[in-house]
Image (cartoon, rainbow, N blue to C red):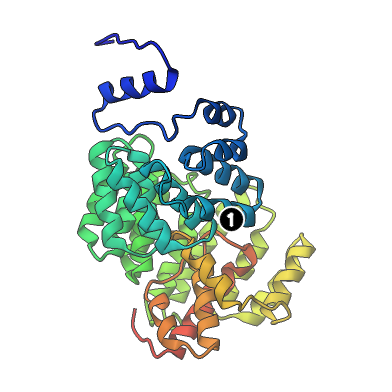
Amino acid sequence: MLEVDSEQGDVLAAMNRVAKRIDAAAAPFSTANSQAVAAWGRGEYERATELDPDFGAAWLNWAETLERSGDQAKAIEVASQALARPALRSTVDRARIDLVLATIRHDVDARVKALRNLVRIAPSDAGLLEALAQAEMNARRFTDAAAHFRELTKLDPANAGVINSLGYAEAFAGDLEAARFAFENYGKQPGQKANSLDSLGEVYFMLGKFGEAEKYFLEAHQANATFLEGEDLRKAAYARWLAGDPKGLAGDLKGADALMARYLEFRHNQHDLLVDWREASWLFSTGRRELAINKLAGVPNRQVAERQSALWRGSIKLPYDLAALKQRYENTPPASDAQPRVLYAAALIAAGKKDEARPLLELWPMPWSPGEALLESWVLPKYLELREAVGMTGK
């Protein structure tokens, strides 16, 4: 404790004076109405805004509470009413209400704009800066995202998650050397060596540099085989397969099968009951449809086997709602977007919008990305089909 200070009298006025002494730029609380503050403190936000219609914190908390309760329509209504008030206090509360509204509406551009405004108002708030960096990342503005993540590493050099995110942002922005440097730093963090190598493999995979991707995946498995329960062997198998012909049909399938066999053996030793399903998925991904369907006969979980077979045979219809797919894609981090990106691209091409689909097909999708397990085997074959449909060749 460097200094002791105190104030007496009206609580709001006293707290505002103390805040000013701590930080000369501090803004006063967004109301001076003690009755409104009392209602706000009890969680009676609507009553608080009736007592002071420009009480920004009350409007903000009201909208947030409605959003958390699932009443999106009412939350939008409340946030919009608040923002319509020219004298709404304070600047920070208005900006946070902007952010709440953009988030509820899944409006990526408005969310980025609101976060930029908040970071401008509170430049020392690392939480806001990280939220902005991630929002820029999701908006595929990789250069801006990388700049924000670099700033965050200066504020907190030991934040492993931020360093890892920086590596992805640098790679997607086109600076592989900067990405490698970031991932190497990430690997120096306690317990992160294997993950840093896996991350390097993923960015090289998405950029179509499959030979390098395989190398890093195998190094990650060697560094810690149990880190991803053998998954790096499966990733290496996909990289080996795609390292040949751009369509993935004339690559080193024999070598890829050998890597996959190592993965399946590892999973078998872990008592994985879905080993046969995993092998079937691999066969389907690599163009061996009938072998894949036959392999499903050995899957103990018959519900999984039947649903997978139905999907492969086309009995299960995939979503083609452009608006919904666009929203899902824009709200998924690029390193996890394989399924929503390919689904969205497929829907665009089906709607005759090939030019809009083409940018979505520049980064290679990782079939192991989060999503519906039954779609893992579908991602790469569909992606290759879509690239051909828009005339994209090479890697």
- Quarter-of-image position of residue 290: bottom right
Quarter of the picture holding the C terminus = bottom left
Quarter of the picture holding the N terminus = top left
Residue extending farthest to the left is: 177
169 with respect to 100 (left or right): left
SS category of the residue bearing label 1: helix
Residue 335, relative to residue 377: is it above or below? Answer: above
Residue 51, relative to residue 142: is it above or below? Answer: above
Spot occupied by residue 202 in the image (x, y as percentages of width and height): 39, 60
21 with respect to 112 (left or right): left
Q: Which residue is mark 1?
A: 77
Residue 259, relative to residue 23: is it above or below? Answer: below
Q: Residue at x 49, y 71 (%)?
A: 341
Spot occupied by residue 216 in the image (x, y as percentages of width and height): 34, 57
376 with respect to 91 (left or right): right
Q: Amino acid at mark 1?
A: Glu
Seen from the viewer's position, the closer of residues 26 and 262 is 26
Residue extending farthest to the right is: 302
- Quarter-of-image position of residue 9: top left
In this figure, what is the number of numbered marks?
1
Q: Residues within 10 Å of mark 1 (few under 14, many from 20)?
A: few
Residue 254, relative to residue 165: is it above or below? Answer: below
- Residue 222 in view here: no
Spot occupied by residue 153 in the image (x, y as percentages of width and height): 26, 42
- Residue 136 in view here: yes
Q: Residue at x 29, y 49 (%)?
A: 149
Seen from the viewer's position, the closer of residues 132 and 180 is 132
Spot occupied by residue 347 in the image (x, y as percentages of width and height): 55, 81
Q: Residue at x 21, y 55 (%)?
A: 178
Seen from the viewer's position, the closer of residues 32 and 71 is 32
